[in-house]
Image: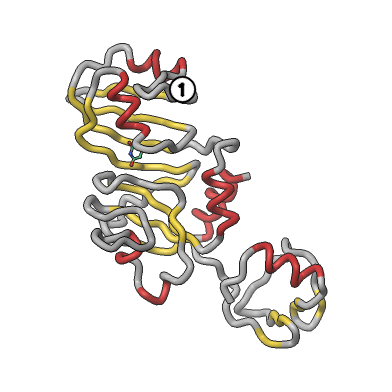
Amino acid sequence: MGRTRKEASILLRKRRVSIDDVVTTRGADQVDPARQTVRVDGAVVTWLERRVLMMHKPAGVVTATQDDREPTVLDLVPPDLRRGLLAVGRLDKDTTGLLLLTDDGGLVHALTHPKRGIEKVYEATYEGELDDAPSRFEAGLTLADGTICRPARIELHDAGRARVTLHEGRYHQVKRMIAACGGHVTGLHRVAVGDLRLDPALAPGSVRPLTADELALLEGSAD
Ligand code: URA
């Protein structure tokens, strides 16, 4: 099927959808595809599930659905799951960690819209002195090009390691914020988006659908 939310809501409004032969107009109705039969215009719908995938992005692939020169994150997805997938935000080619992919444009919007300010957590390694970075991150620092960042958090650990929490997703943001404080990022790994954490058992380059519990955590973050 692969319908968008908008298309689905039009079908519902026009009373073209039924669950077990009862017409439904409510998108919120829960359906158990194993037990119930959904029809659109009388034809049985076989694929209701939208796809929401968790990837452990490895270094060396770009966050794009197509690229003439570089391998993309989509190349790592099994072909039968690829159709219509969009990335939820972007990670740089050399950044690793949690990347979500979905065919649900509404979910991408809900998770990336700046107004929602969904939390993203990164582990960084860096060179340089960042002693004043925690207060500058908290105050909302200004990047070299004049961009003013929202208040963020950086916790400095030993041996040039830091944990960074942002509520927005600008281009190269962690690297540029750390650069603005006089440091240089040497490695970046995303561990969480909202309440959802990267599964530590998921190897770099692997991808799998979210579990129902993970989906609930993510939807809670997007509310
Ligand atoms: N900030 C960066 O600098 N790079 C990323 O990939 C993500 C956040």
Residue 73 x %, y %: 33, 59
Question: Which colour style is shown?
Answer: secondary structure
Left or right, residue 89 beside residue 115: left
The residue drawn where x is 36% and y is 30% is 164
Residue 140 x %, y %: 46, 19
Q: Disc 1 marks which residue? A: 148
Amino acid residing under circle 1? Ile
State the SS at label 1: loop
Q: Is residue 210 visible?
A: no
- Work out whether 80 lies above or below 52: below
> Residue 44 sits in which quadrant?
bottom right
Say few, some or many: other residues with alpha carbon within 10 Å of mark 1 (under 14 / 14 to 19 / 20 or more): few
Q: Quadrant of the N terminus?
A: bottom right
Q: Can you tell me which quadrant of the image ligand 1 is in? A: top left
- Is label 1's Cβ within 8 Å of ligand 1? no
Left or right, residue 212 beside residue 75: right
Nearest the camera: 29 or 4?
Answer: 4
Q: Quadrant of the C terminus?
A: top right
